[in-house]
Amino acid sequence: MLDKLRIVKQRYDEVSDLIIQPDIIMDQKRYVQLSKEYKDLGSVVEKGDEYQSLLNNIEEAKEIISDGSDAEMTEMAKMEMEEANTRIPQLEEEIKVLLIPKDPEDSKNAVVELRAGTGGDEASIFAGDLFRMYSKYCESKGWKVATVDYSEGTNGGFKEIQFEVNGADVYGTLKFEAGVHRVQRVPQTETQGRVHTSAATCMVFPEAEEFDVEINPKDVRIDFFCSSGPGGQSVNTTYSAVRLTHIPTGLVAQCQDQKSQHKNKEKAFKVLRSRLYDMELAKKNAEDALKRGSMVSSGDRSAKIRTYNYAQGRVTDHRIGLSLYDLPNILNGDIQRIIDELMMAENTEKLKSLSDGF
């Protein structure tokens, strides 16, 4: 453990010197990467200093106890030694978690897309419920949510909706929500009182910076069209909505949320960059998950991850077999408990693969 902490401290000092170099400051991509690394290493160094301090306390206490000339000092040394021995195993676990290699994408903002799946109007209504759940959750975290594009369902909700989330470590948190969500309930349109099963797919992309993905303007076809939805009379008369088609991959991104064509184009490019970036990332994640045998974040968007059962008031996450009988609160945005459990499961998997090094 001490050897690992010494290596981390050495790297921390190196990065500390690098981020004040003028050539690094000029290179935006490198500067962002190093600043993130400096922050992450700082947390490990802080715990490492506490760990070293406890080991020193134990050595000093041993000397006082072996001397034994002062009864009061000996008693204090025994208490201090006991406290240090209790704290050290906890601290070692905390350090092990901090030493798990961080996914560089985790600190990024995210683009989330919800799509109604099987179940017709009921699936659209459920996609609307999920959008409300995520909006409430993001609000509780102090994150900013901005709609990019949407298509409303015929009886409420959304056939699909796309929104950006900005804040601290957004992608690292919301990536656990990617997959198929199922709902089991009696639809509003059901006259016989039968329970139907409907589904909606959630996709989460890390928001790519301009320096993450370079898009050749010649590879993009830009179409302008009239927006649909709220926004006053000007919405349906001006060509403010923008659709981008990336010709080499066939990926499409569109935005009609803003009244300004320029702002819509900017947002659509942001989404297109994120989708291209995510394509590469999905390949990498699938390879990593295969190596680790990970069930938590395999990146498979067709995987059924969660069921919301109204009759039982139950929400079950199938990846870790977690069932919570608190449906109303969860749909009201209280999903942190589920995400915490998923994070813990993933960290446990990663620790297993790293355990040989400790």
Image: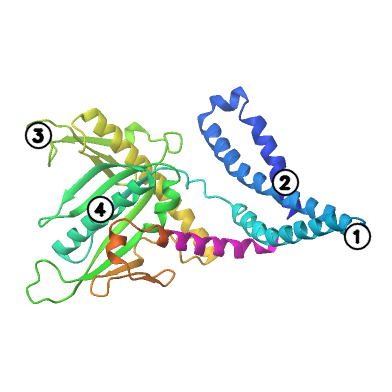
First reached walking from the N terminus: tag 3 or tag 4: 4
User: What is the crowding at mark 4: few (fewer than 14 residues within 10 Å), some, or many (at least 20)?
Assistant: some
- Any magenta on residue 326? no
Quarter of the image with the C terminus in it: bottom right
**Disc 1 to disc 3, C-alpha distance:** 84 Å
First reached walking from the N terminus: tag 2 or tag 4: 2
Q: What amino acid type should be assigned to the residue bearing mark 4?
A: Arg
First reached walking from the N terminus: tag 1 or tag 2: 2
Q: Quadrant of residue 258?
A: top left
Q: Is residue 306 above or below residue 45?
A: below
Residue at 18% of width from left, 53% of height from top? Answer: 158
Task: Answer whether residue 120 is visible to the viewer in this image.
Answer: yes
**Disc 1 to disc 4, C-alpha distance:** 64 Å
Label pair 1/3, CB-CB below 8 angstroms: no
**Depth order, front residue of 347/353:** 347
Residue 310 location (% of width, % of height): 24, 70
Task: Answer whether residue 358 is visible to the viewer in this image.
Answer: no
Query: Which element is circle 3 on?
Result: loop
For the record, the magenta segment spans 340-358
Residue 69 location (% of width, % of height): 93, 56
Of tags 1 and 2, the one toward the viewer is 1
User: What is the crowding at mark 1: few (fewer than 14 residues within 10 Å), some, or many (at least 20)?
Assistant: few
Q: Which residue is mark 4?
A: 132
Q: Which residue is mark 1?
A: 66
Residue at 29% of width from left, 36% of height from top? Answer: 267
Q: Quadrant of residue 311?
A: bottom left
Viewed as shown, does residue 54 lie left or right of 101? right
Q: Is residue 256 above or below residue 287?
A: above
